Structure formats: C-alpha cells, structure tokens
Image (cartoon, grey):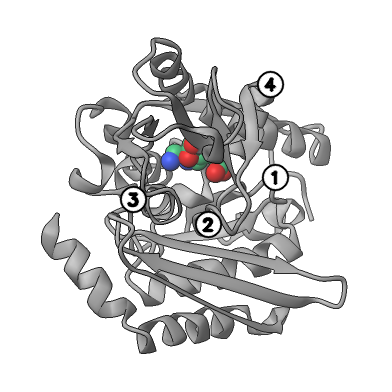
Amino acid sequence: MKSPKSLVIASRESPLAMWQARHVQAQLQTLYPDCAVSILGMSTQGDRILDKTLSKIGGKGLFIKELEQALQDSRADLAVHSIKDVPMVLPEGFALAAIGERANPFDAFVSNDYSDLSALPAGAVVGTSSLRREAQIRARFPHLTVRPLRGNVQTRLAKLDAGEYAAVILAAAGLERLELHGRIRAVLSPADSLPAAGQGALGIEIAAHRTDLIEVLLPLNHAQTAACITAERALARALGGSCQVPLAAYCTGDEQGVLTLHGLVAHPDGSHTLTASAQAPAPYADALGRAVAKKLADDGAVELIEAVLAEN
Ligand SMILES: NCc1[nH]cc(CCC(=O)O)c1CC(=O)O
C-alpha cells in the first residue's frame, strides 16, 4: 500500500479530545513517516450547550455532527471520537474504519474527602449527568443524593473542588489520558457501575465513500477491542440506546477469543434494575449483543426504557 501524502484528523477541542487526536496522529505518523498528519480542532454544539443535561438536548450526535460535516466537505479525512460518544446508528454516508485498543473501561470515584462510594455519609451529593451512573448509584446507595454535573473533565473537577459535590463520577480512561489518575480515589467495579457501551475505547470515523482510507487505518484497529465494542454497541442499538436511556454494556474477551457480555438497564431512580449476560466466540459479537438485548427485553427492558423516556 502507498503511504498517503497527507491526513487531516478532525477533533473536538476539549483537552481530552485533543489528547485522543494527538494519540492517533502519533500512531499514524509512526506508520507513515512521510505523511503530513495534522489535526483540525473544532467546537461542537455539545461543547457549547452546557446548561442542560445531555439527555435533554438531543444526545450523543451533538458532539460529532460538526466533525462529520468536515469529513463530508473533505476538510478532514478522519475523525477521532471516544466511541462512547458515537451514536449506535451512524448517519447515512459515514462509517467506523477502526476501533483502537481499549484503555481502562471503568468509572472512577473522585473526591477530596472520601475514599469510595461506600464511605459517603447519608445525603452526600454525588455529581454525574449520566443516567446510567445515576441509576446504579441510587440502586446500590439509596441514601446518597445525585445531582447533575456537566462540562469537560477539568470543569467537572473544578466543580468538585469548589465544594459543590462530595464526590463526582468520571470515566477512568479520561482521567488517565489527561494525567489526572492521581485524582482517582477508587475505580468502580462493574458490579457497582457497569460501564457504558464503548467506554475507554477510541473510534475512527470516515466518510463511507473514502474506501481508500480503509487499508490505511486498518493497523489502528485492535481486533479484540473491536469485537467487544461490536457486542456492546449491538446490545445498545437493539435497545435503542442513547443518552436518554440508563443502559450499560460491558464485554471482555479471553485468550481463546470467547466474549462475555454483560448488559444492564435501570430506572434512574434506582427502583428497577435488569441485568443479563451471555458468551459467544468473537466472530459472533454482533449476535451476542442482540442476544443479551433479547434477554433484557424478555425481562421487561423495553417497557422500562419506555417508562423512563415518557418521564423525561
Ligand atoms: N461523556 C463524555 C466522555 N466521553 C468519553 C469520556 C471518557 C473517555 C472514554 O470513555 O473513552 C467522557 C468523560 C466521562 O464520561 O467521564
């Protein structure tokens, strides 16, 4: 394959997004030393609208629309995203070309005064705007108060430090990438907080007609991670997954290539929690996701999701 002459990476401008874009830039530069790899930083609607919870303003797509526009207009060749922020169904004309190796997939407990969720006193205020995190905290720790928390990672930490919250929950991967892992007091086990579909992994999006890029980007794909993310996203897609729905999906793979997928759907008030899991060989990742979604649906997940959507 011929090395491309130049590659432009579209990225959001938050420090985390720029770290991720630079990470992919460095990988591409190593693979293609003669290629000019640059980053086009962009601000998105999701970054600008900070006063409402994400689930009320239209969800994940808001963080990637502008980047997709740049791909469509040939201002950029690829877009780097936290795959967690990528809608389960991409708009017509776009495709995921690669999924990078997953970093820490778990949620992190961050606090200046307490060591873990279990150490918080009754009434302590925990910050998160994720319905998934809220549902799981309320179910396990009903004596705690959950309040919304938005903004980029640094903004959220600043609100914690200003004393607005006793603790906040953030993705461990984001903190580690920003060299803020020192702020992590506890990594939440999947039993306490099952992660979101795709958490901790990067996705590389292209315009679907750019078939020339598929071979170029293939070395960035991490097969084991891609299989896990395929299963998690198939589960979320089958249940209409979006930010409006408290849904978790977490898949691991063993050395034999057998995937284990755990799924969870819950009411944000913590009153109802449904879980299901199953195993399948990696080539059946998509079917595995749909199978676990079916188990959840058989237990009432669809009605639960509809009830949550009707309340919001
Ligand atoms: N929702 C925003 C977002 N998107 C990706 C990450 C972290 C990195 C990742 O999960 O890959 C975060 C921050 C967070 O959830 O705390």
Residue at image position (18%, 46%) is: 56
Query: For the view shown, which residue lies furthest in the top direction?
Result: 162
Whole-number angstrom distance, CA of label 1 to CA of label 2: 28 Å
Q: Position of residue 191 (x, y in %)?
A: 58, 59
Q: Which mark is residue 103?
A: 1
Labels 3 & 4 near each other (Cβ < 8 A): no
Whole-number angstrom distance, CA of label 4 to CA of label 2: 41 Å
Instruction: Indicate which label's residue lies in the foreground, 4 or 2.
Output: 4
Disc nearer the start of the sequence (4/1): 1
Whole-number angstrom distance, CA of label 4 to CA of label 1: 16 Å
Does any atom of ligand 1 lie closer than 8 Å to the CB of label 1?
yes
In this picture, is 153 found above or below 158?
below
Disc nearer the start of the sequence (3/4): 3
At label 2, the amino acid type is Arg
Residue at image position (52%, 51%) is: 83
- For mark 4, what is the residue? 182
Q: Which mark is residue 131?
A: 3
Secondary structure at badge 4 equals: helix
Q: From the viewer's perspective, is 81 left or right of 223? A: left
Secondary structure at badge 2 equals: loop
Whole-number angstrom distance, CA of label 3 to CA of label 4: 26 Å
Q: From the viewer's perspective, is 100 left or right of 159? A: right
- For mark 2, what is the residue? 210
Disc nearer the start of the sequence (3/2): 3
Disc nearer the start of the sequence (3/1): 1
Residue at image position (32%, 53%) is: 243
